[in-house]
Amino acid sequence: MSIEVRNVTKKFGDFIAVNDVSLHVPNGELVALLGPSGSGKTSLLRIIAGLEQAEAGQVLFEGEDATARHVRHRSVGFVFQHYALFRHMSVFENVAFGLRVRPRASRPDEKEIRRRVMDLLKLVQLDWLGNRLPSELSGGQRQRVALARALAVEPRVLLLDEPFGSLDAKVRQELRRWLRRLHDEIRLTSVFVTHDQEEALEVADRVVVMNHGRVEQVGTPQEVFDHPATPFVMGFLGNVNIFGGRVEGGRAILGPLHLDYPEHPHAESLPAAGYTRPHELEVDRAEGGGGGFWAALRYANTAGAVVKLELATGDDRLVHVETTREQYELLRPTTGERLYVRPRQVRIFVEPGKGLPPPSERVVPPK
Amino acid sequence: MATIVGVQNRLTAGPRNLTEPFAVRVVLTLVALAYLLVFLVVPLGAVFAEALQKGWAAYVNAVREPMALSALWLTLLTAAIAVPLNLVFGVAAAWAIAKFEFPGKNALITLIDLPFAVSPVISGMVFILLFGRQGYLGPWLQAHDLKVVFAVPGLVLATIFVTFPFVARELIPVMQAGGTEEEEAARVLGAGGWTTFYRVTLPSVKWGLLFGVILCNARALGEFGAVSVVSGHIRGKTNTLPLHVEILYNEYNFQAAFAVASLLTFVAILTLVAKSVVEWRSSRRTDVLSEPRA
């Protein structure tokens, strides 16, 4: 079932949690609402579920207005951040709850309930734990029970609020791959909220990046990562070095970076910022051109698949660089040594609203 | 089960450098025991000793005397009306306070505590002021031939007033700790308001509820001040057990007074046992229900 959100606004007192948001989730897609805390992503999810009432705007399921429909009748499955399992019920009864509370006419008989609950518990690989209480399960198991319970009522939409938020790193990775496989299997339209960009990029078909109650960008993980529409998206999806400065006369002067910027040939100076990811910078002992600069190596973290370098420019600006182990071994820089930092790629965002076509991307070709 | 074992270990084996010297522990324990003995055990023993001083037959006679039986019956009747009403009210109030936001919520919480704050005698006087012959509603009641004060309805009203905080007070923290997520989950799964309450909210607070009811019941059976004011002390008609004890005592019938008092003491002991059982059961549940293990 497709979901359509139209101009939804939600306030808590003076705080605008969701600000005129519109969104379309096509049937069968797995979409991530990604943003920092307070960006309105959970509020938006709860509005779609009907757990929260929007001040303005509409929610449509399959083109049909569901704004006034009670949460009971929206046929959504909702997985809560802290699972919200019924503490006094066994795993089996938790999953069976949605079937047992149906009106008598549509309630399946005991045999059918048993069959469906056991099928779901098998699906989440927990059929051997049916008699346990939620308190006797691990976090990852509770998460899967919560999912089975949400699926038991055969929802037409699945909504998950920070589904892996309270799990430790390893379980989290396993579970999100498992969720992705599960989604490929059952193809249920799903929306999940997360503040973890890695999670969103790995699991979702499409990512909706939110900030301050607004949608910053919607796109495939590849699109939002490689072509961030705004400085916020760039900064939120992964680490980034930010160089503040200006553009004028076809040049961009961004702190130590000096780049060509033919998009703005005018003499008028405009504030701008250059964004570049640590792996888009490279270091060398020789002056390499390309608009780069010299900086002193402060610290090198060699534990991990990539080597993380921290450098400081003459005016004490910190720059983060990521390089491969091989390159690091070839160079073997010492702490305090001056190295030339050359950008492979810089995205330049000119202050919007000045009648020019920002944001634009400037790719400095390799030497 | 691992959690329970952990708790027991913590209780029995603390690191040596964190406990007091042996002598200090012995002295403190002895002081506490002596205090208990003087102020609780001796008076309690005295009740039974006095009650039985003229032998078992006299004891049974005092308890089986018609006025005593009528007082016992009235006490049970009062509690049987007051406790269920306060149960319903307490659950409703606690539910509203813990699960919903509404204007006047703090005022309601304060109001619930009111009977704890005022002296029971004043609580009784309030009902005289309202329903007495010269009270605000007195003339209307007389015109309709209804008797509240110096009759059973007055006793019930006064008892309800005095005991109504118990259930609500016990439930509010338990319900607040539970949060609203489980209820929300039930609603999303298609449960209606009543089903949600009956199948999700109520079972999760049942121990707190039982605890509140036990305390409420104990107070309803033992209430003296407020009941004394509205009762009028009509023997065989408006005397509850505590009032009956007072009358016997004032008539220098000490043995009978203590015999009847021993009935109330029994109730008190039963209450304590029930309370301990509930506390033990519920603490065991919260242990098991504490945070995830993995």
Image (spheres, rainbow, N blue to C red):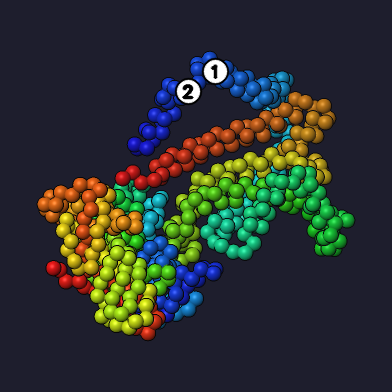
- The image shows residue B2 at horizontal and vertical percentages of 34, 36
Task: Tell me, yes or no, whether dots 2 and 1 are on the same chain.
Answer: yes
What residue is at 65 percent from the left and 31 percent from the top?
Answer: B265
Residue placed under numbered mark 2 in the picture: B19
Q: Quadrant of the C terminus of chain B?
A: top left
Seen from the viewer's position, the closer of residues B131 and B100 is B100
- The image shows residue B53 at horizontal and vertical percentages of 71, 20
Give residue A275's quadrant in the image: bottom left
Residue placed under numbered mark 1 in the picture: B24
- The image shows residue A26 at horizontal and vertical percentages of 28, 77
Q: Residue furthest bottom?
A: A355
Q: Residue furthest top?
A: B23
Q: Chain of mark 1?
A: B
Give the mark nearer the N terminus: 2 vs 1. Answer: 2
Give residue A227's quadrant in the image: bottom left
- How many marks on residues? 2
Q: Is residue A235 left or right of residue B142?
A: left
| Mark 1, other Cα within 10 Å: few <14 / some 14–19 / many ≥20 | few
> Can residue A360 be spotted in the picture?
yes
Quote the CA–CA distance across marks 2 and 1.
Answer: 10 Å
What amino acid is at disc 2? Thr
Regarding mark 1 in the picture, which secondary structure is present there? Answer: helix
Seen from the viewer's position, the closer of residues A280 and A173 is A280
